[in-house]
Image: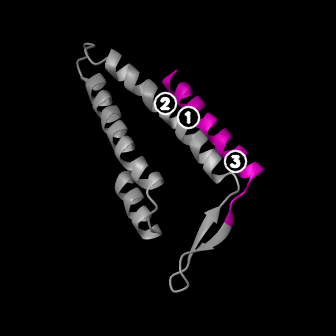
Amino acid sequence: MLLSFSGIIVVIEMVIVAGWLGSSPPAPFNSGPETARFVTCYSSMDHTMVAILMAYNGVLLFFGSFLAIKTRKAFSAFRESQLIGFTIYTLSTFTVAILPVLFAIDLQLEAQFAIRSFAIM
């Protein structure tokens, strides 16, 4: 049951990404100054699809936080509800701290790469 529910979540995300790739495939784009050129991918629906994916993942994160709050005092011999809640709260904190830095501030590509790498670790 849990595996099928997780599979449905992943399939929905894959359908969204497949729709993005089918409707507006990314193309290489040269950016940066003449002395240090970077090749990045760009799509005409880039901002729209990123917003859709973030909204979907935000709803999942909100639902996970809701479930963590509701089950935080549930008895368990292994205390997994508390560990899952701690993981959800930590992920929520990093999301609230990292996303505004990445999308609201115009950073150089090296700084964006460093922040994203730190957030993934």
Q: Which one is earlier in the sequence, the residue at label 1 or at label 3? A: 3
Tag 2 secondary structure: helix
Q: Is residue 121 visible?
A: no
Which of the labelled discs sits on residue 60, or is there none? 2
39 displayed left or right of 19: left
Q: Which residues are magenta?
A: 1-27
**Mark 2 Cα within 10 Å, few/some/many (few <14, many 20+)?**
few
Distance of label 1 from label 2 (alpha carbons): 6 Å
Can you name the residue that lies furthest to the bottom here? Answer: 35
Q: Which residue is mark 1?
A: 56
Residue 77, above or below 36: above
Q: Quadrant of residue 114?
A: bottom left
1 and 2 marks in contact (CB < 8 Å)? yes
Residue drawn at point x = 38 percent, y = 59 percent: 115
Q: How many marks?
A: 3
Locate residue 23, reporting x and y percent.
Answer: 76, 49
Q: Quadrant of residue 71?
A: top left
Residue 65, above or below 25: above
The kind of residue on which mark 3 rests is Trp
Residue drawn at point x = 65 percent, y = 70 percent: 29
